[in-house]
Image: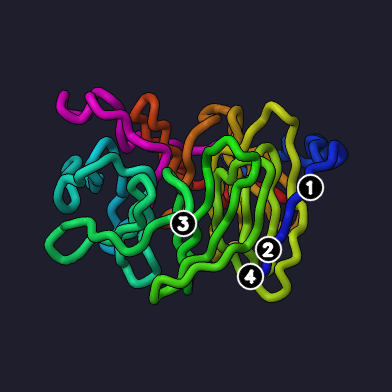
Amino acid sequence: MKKVVICFLSIFCLLFTQSTHAQQKNNLRYEIMLNSNMLEPSLRKDRFISCIDISPNKYLTLSAGHNIYMLGWGGITRLGKEADSTINSYAFASDGLLMTVKNRELCYMNEKGDLVSLVKLPNAGMGIAGGREVMYLFDQKGDDKAYRLYAFAKGGKYKQLLVSPKPVTSVIEMSDSLYIAIGSAVFSLSPKDFKLNLVAGFQKESEIKSLTADPENNILYVATRDAIYALKNGSLVYVTGDFGGGIIKYFSKGLIIFNPETCDIIRIVNVDKSIIF
């Protein structure tokens, strides 16, 4: 089982100051999709987890406590049945199957809305992200200073891709590469030769919270604790500092920003037209 060990050097922790604050063609336009005032009191008792995805029928999907919810123009409705334990993370597979992580269990939602256990995971509370052919599972927390990223394929087979000295916070596919957020840096991993490359590095205190991709324009979006950036062909561009620390998702030519602590969901509708690389 092939693996890559990441060594962090201080030279990699430089902020790309020369290109981040680029000009914008148009002012960014925001749409409010959700805030705490729109939620029913019953939904405010459980804190939403730092995860967001798009369902096959194009609904935003959120999770809090033992439940998964879909957000549409008509409000929030529960998806499936209540789980028997807290949901740590979730993602839709390329075939539309909803996969979840509960403690050390990888589960899928069946036609009845039950979460059915597939396999025991190496560690509890792992993150999950969907790919074209596999699902990615990664260690978001722990205390052994060895955080792993796995590719999980149909049939219950999974392969270790790398080991990191810091938690993996986000994973996203774009083009022929896999992009991985670890600490305050973004790396790319080629699935063909498993070569790992530094793509962008930020100041040590600017930890990356989330990654998302616009596959049509080949733009990678990066959300740090303080701001959101766009990356294309090695050029890193500052997008906005209004919604730092959120979880981001590119969808339908807009950038969705979710703050699980405040229950705010904002959509930037013209983000791709407002960036000059």
Image quarter of residue 207: top right
Whether tag 3 and tag 1 are in contact, CB under 8 A, the answer is: no
What secondary structure is found at the residue carrying circle 2?
Answer: loop
Seen at 54% across and 43% down, the residue is 210
* Viewer-closest of 137 and 222: 137
**Residue that label 3 marks:** 129
Structural crowding at the residue carrying mark 4, measured as other residues with C-alpha within 10 Å and reported as few (<14), some (14–19) or many (≥20)? few
- Which label's residue is closer to the chain start, 3 or 1? 1
Distance from the alpha carbon under mark 2 to that under mark 3: 19 Å
Seen at 20% across and 30% down, the residue is 43
Does residue 47 show up magenta in the picture?
Answer: yes
* Viewer-closest of 31 and 233: 233
| 167 to the left or right of 120 | right
Whether tag 2 and tag 4 are in contact, CB under 8 A, the answer is: yes
Q: Position of residue 11 (x, y in %)?
A: 87, 39
Seen at 55% across and 53% down, the residue is 171
Magenta segment boundaries in residue numbering: 27-54
**Three-letter code, disc 1:** Cys
Distance from the alpha carbon under mark 1 to that under mark 4: 19 Å
Res. 126 mark:
none
**Three-letter code, disc 4:** Met
Q: Position of residue 48 (x, y in %)?
A: 33, 34
Figure quadrant of the N terminus: bottom right
Q: Nearer the viewer, mark 2 or mark 3?
A: 2
**Residue that label 2 marks:** 3
